[in-house]
Structure formats: C-alpha cells, structure tokens
Amino acid sequence: MSGDRQRFEALALPHMDAAYNLARWLAGSQADAEDVVQEAMLRAFRAFDGAKVENVKPWLLTIVRNCWRNRAADERRRGQAPLPAEDERPLVFEGPDPETDALRASDRRQLDAIIAGLPQEFREALVLREIEDMSYREIAETTGAPIGTVMSRLARARAMLKQQWLAKTCDVLP
Amino acid sequence: MSCPELFRTQAFIDGDVEGSEAAAVERHVAECAECQAFCVDAAVLSDAIRNSATRHVASPELRRRVVAALDAADRADVVRPDWSAASAARTSRRRFWQGALGGAGVTGLAASLSILSLLPPSATTLADQVTQAHTRALMSGHAIAVASSDHHTVKPWFAGRIDISPPVQDFAAQGFKLTGGRLDKVAGATAAVLTYQHGRHEVDLFVWADRGSTLPTTGVRHGYHLMFWRSGDLNFAAVSDTAVPELADFVQLVRSEPE
C-alpha cells in the first residue's frame, strides 16, 4: 500500500460516517447516498496528493456534496428527476402518545421527518451544525456559502424546526 | 426575529464567538428577552436533534466498496501535503443556557420536548422527568390541583386518586408552607405531588410507588436542584430553584417527620 494511500486512509476514512450521513440527508435514499459516497471517496483520493488540505472533514464533505449535486443534475438531464428527499419519506406524523414505550422511536421519526422536509439549504446547514458538530467556517467551506449566509440559514432552519415541532406536538402541552 | 443581534447571539450559542466578543454577547443577552428565548429554544432543539435525530452511518458493505474502489485506483506517487488538521476547540454554551434559563425561560417548546425523555426510568431520566414535571406545572399554572395549607384537606384529596398514601405535612413554622397538591407523571407512574412555598420559591415534593429504579443522586437539572430518596416502598423527589442548603433542610424535615 502506498504512503499516499495510507495517509488517505488514516485521515479521510475516519470521516466516512460523516460523509455518508450528509449524503443520506441530501439524497434521501440509502442506495443513492452509498453511490454518492463511493464516488466522493474515490474523487477525494485522486485529488488528495495534490490538495493542500488543512481540515479534512469539510474538504471531504465538500466533495460529497458536489458529487450529490452532479448526480442530481445528471438525473434531471436524463429526465429521471429524483424525488426530493422530503418526498421519499413518509411525512406521517404519529400522534404523540406519552404512554407508549415506542416514544423515543416516535420522537426520532418525527424529528427526522421534519428535518428531512426542510428545504435543502436549511437542512444541510442544520445537519452539519447539530449532527456533525461543525463550525460556521467549516459549514461555509462545505456548502460554498458565505458565513453570513450560513448563519441566516441556521436561524431559519431552527425557526422552521421549532414551528413544525410545536405544530405536531402542541396537543400534548398541559 | 427582529433583534439585530440575533445572529451574534446564535453564533455565541453555537460556540462560534470567543473572548471579549462573547462577553459582549452575554451582556446583550442579559438584557434582551428575544435573545434569551432564542438561546433556550436553540439549546432545547440542539439537545433534541443530538439525542433523537438520526446520524446515518456507513454500512460495512459501503466501507468494503470504498476500499475496493481505492484499491483499484491506488497509485504510488507520494507527496506531502501540509497537514494541520487541528481545529480550534469550541466550547458549547448549551449547557449553560439550559441551566441559567431553564427556570425563567422555559417555553412551550421546552415543555413539549419533555416527551423526549419519557423513557424507562433510569437515574438520568428520572431526574429529567421530575424537573420537567415541575417546570411544566409551574409554566402551565396547573401546579396546584387542590389548594390548601391544611394537610387534613390535602391528604384525603389523594385518596381515590392514587394508590399510594403520601405523607402530607405542613412545615410553615420552619419556612416551608404547604400550598396544596396535584397528580403528575414520573417515569410512567402516577406521582402525588405536594407543593410548598418557601419565600419566593416553589418546592415540589414528588412521591410515587417504588418500582426498583435506581434513584439519581442529588443534582442540578436545568437550574433546578433535585434530591431523591427512598422510604419504605415509596420514592421521593424534592425539586426547587431554591438554594441547596435550604432544599436539604426541607428534605430533612420531610424525612424526620413521622407520618
């Protein structure tokens, strides 16, 4: 195994879950997300030796995001418009029932469904911030947006999430 | 959103503001109700997402596929990129805000998210649930279902409503005045709650049938102090935003008073 390969595996492969998580939240299906990640890892490896990478995670996630965008554009050109992520998930909100043991699963489904239903820019900002715990600078690097835009997207995403969560759960308020 | 400082407040909550700027944000938030509410909401949402939203993970099959693709593409040329991957450690202010504003600023959002932790009772969830039941009752104004400082009124109220007989005492002489009682849920069980007034502070005493749960140790949740103990086949929790020594005094009164 080449030294290059070893270095790539040591530095980039630990971020494979992050890569897949972002791809999955963007693409909406497991099969699409896995294809995106495989392609992205290969591209990242090829770009790796020449790239002066200071922070591997946002660098890798940028490639993941670009692969997803190219793929979505290709599919649109071929007339196979992929369904937006939010349409692939059943947006069925189950009435919260504090008595059931399945509550946590229900919370998870509801939260996931709300996040999946957010417009892409807001969804990815929220996922990168709250699930991947990335800084504004890293999110800006990954999404190619200025930091100010990241901030406004995050604020909007949170406002939408709050509003929709309350709308789905207000009937359990005392 | 209307406060012009809101993005800066958000950056503070997200750990993207440091040093003297962070101090400036703190001064602003101390005086801005909108930013205070935003901090609490953001902290609650953040907790909900981090605890409950799905972090998808790469399957072993995907990892195999990737390694195979790298094998196929492997090359021997080696260069040395400049690695300095250490990113600045960022401190999260979420905990602070949950603690600092848990009492004053719990919103409908926080109350609704309390369903997140109605889980099988572990020590942690018990502590969370008692706190949430306490704050929910305070916020909703339903803290007292039977209002009376007379334990001869409060005690019979519980009979027929709950299958335990909680000790009902008034400690007005010692500074903890019985104000009434209500029923609440703790870890799926119905609890009798006795409400006390201590100065400006509300003290709730939760009593429920022991189900063998591990009780939490004394602690702080969302700015409230909690003390748990077991007596006979009953579990007890005292919760309040009063100071710890005073809550300890209260607990001692309850525990020493023979039924």
Image: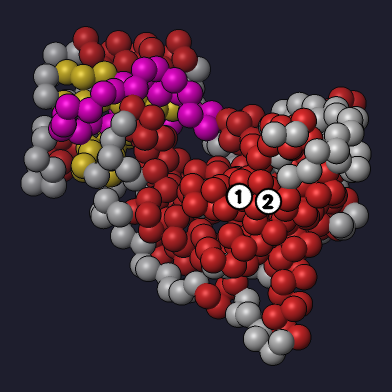
Q: Quadrant of the C terminus of chain B?
A: top left
Q: Is residue B30 left or right of residue A96?
A: right
Q: Residues within 10 Å of mark 2 (few under 14, many from 20)?
A: few
Is residue B175 visible to us here? no
Relative to the observer, which residue lies in front, B85 or B228?
Answer: B85
Q: Chain of mark 1?
A: B
Q: Which residues are magenta?
A: B200-228
Across and down, in percent, residue A85 comes to 60, 72
Q: Amino acid at mark 1?
A: Ala
Across and down, in percent, residue A54 comes to 86, 35
User: CA gap, disc 2 to disc 1?
Assistant: 6 Å
Q: Residue at label 1?
A: B68
Q: Residue at left 76%, top 86%? A: A77
Q: Chain of mark 2?
A: B
Q: Residue at left 28%, top 44%? A: B185
The answer to whether the residues at label 2 and label 1 have Cβ atoms under 8 Å apart is yes
Q: Determine if the magenta segment contains residue B53.
A: no
Q: Which residue is most to the bottom?
A: A79
Q: Residue at label 2?
A: B72
Q: Residue at left 59%, top 39%? A: B104
